[in-house]
Image (cartoon, helix red, strand yellow):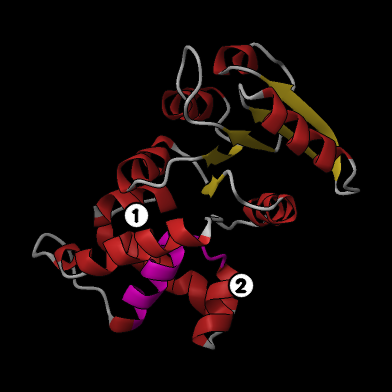
Amino acid sequence: MINVAIVEDDIYIRNSVVEFLQMQPEFNHVGEFGSVEAFLKINTVPDVLLLDIELPGITGLEGAFRIKQKHPSVNILMLTVYEDKERIFKALQAGATGYLLKNTPLHKIKTALLEALDGGAPMSPLVAKKVIAYFSGKQVAAESNEHEQLTLREREVSQLLITGETYKQIAWKLNISPDTVRQHIKNIYRKLQVNSRVQLINEFR
């Protein structure tokens, strides 16, 4: 069973999400908080957290960083009305696993929560398009003389990894085995001298 929580100051939105998730058999406990400060006081840490950006007191962007510092194992999904690239990348750099817009249907929020726990980085379609467009334009820059050049296949894997695909999804899209995907990712991390998806995103910025 999965423990999930939401930090959202809009009572209507918070109640709607909580009521829906409480009816889903996959979720054991749904915690609800109106601020980052309130969430940081708890002792029982959820498996995955839905986090608004525009909050009273500590903002969601600052909150994501503080929460990951205190509870590194928490999967954070931003749930916000903002779709600008600046906030998207600040959230990912702060440690967010995914980025959802508030117009996301409730059943897709559920899917995103499960995907995050499976190693993915779910994003709303519009957000994913912006991330893909951004990194497509940055591919050449990532192959600077400071790093060993990535192969074509490694660049393909990098782009899919950055945009939130799980190892299984990458394997399916590229028609290769999950073990081959893992080997490519090891090579990518070694060549770019990074250790995580977040560091990889920063490397391509």
Q: Give 153 or 53, whichever is nearer the viewer.
A: 53
Instruction: Compare residues 73 and 36 and report the one nearer the observer.
Output: 36
Which quadrant would residue 167 be assigned to in this image? Answer: bottom right
Residue 42: tell me if it is visible. Answer: yes
- Magenta part of the chain: 153-166
Dot 1: element: helix
Circle 1 crowding by C-alpha within 10 Å: few under 14, some 14–19, many from 20: many
Image check: 165 left or right of 184?
A: right
Q: Is residue 182 left or right of residue 41?
A: left
* Quadrant in which the N terminus is drawn: top right
- Identify whether 200 is placed above or below 67: below
The local secondary structure at tag 2 comes to: helix
- Pointer 2 residue: 168
Q: Amino acid at mark 1?
A: Leu
Across and down, in percent, residue 174 comes to 49, 84
Q: Using the image as rendered, state which of residue 92 and residue 12 is in the foreground.
A: 12
Kindly indicate the quadrant of the structure image that contains residue 133. bottom left
Where's residue 16, x and y in %? 76, 36
- Image height of 88 relative to 126, above or below: above
Residue displayed at 51% across by 62% down: 125
* Amino acid type of the residue that numbered disc 2 sits on in the rendered structure: Lys
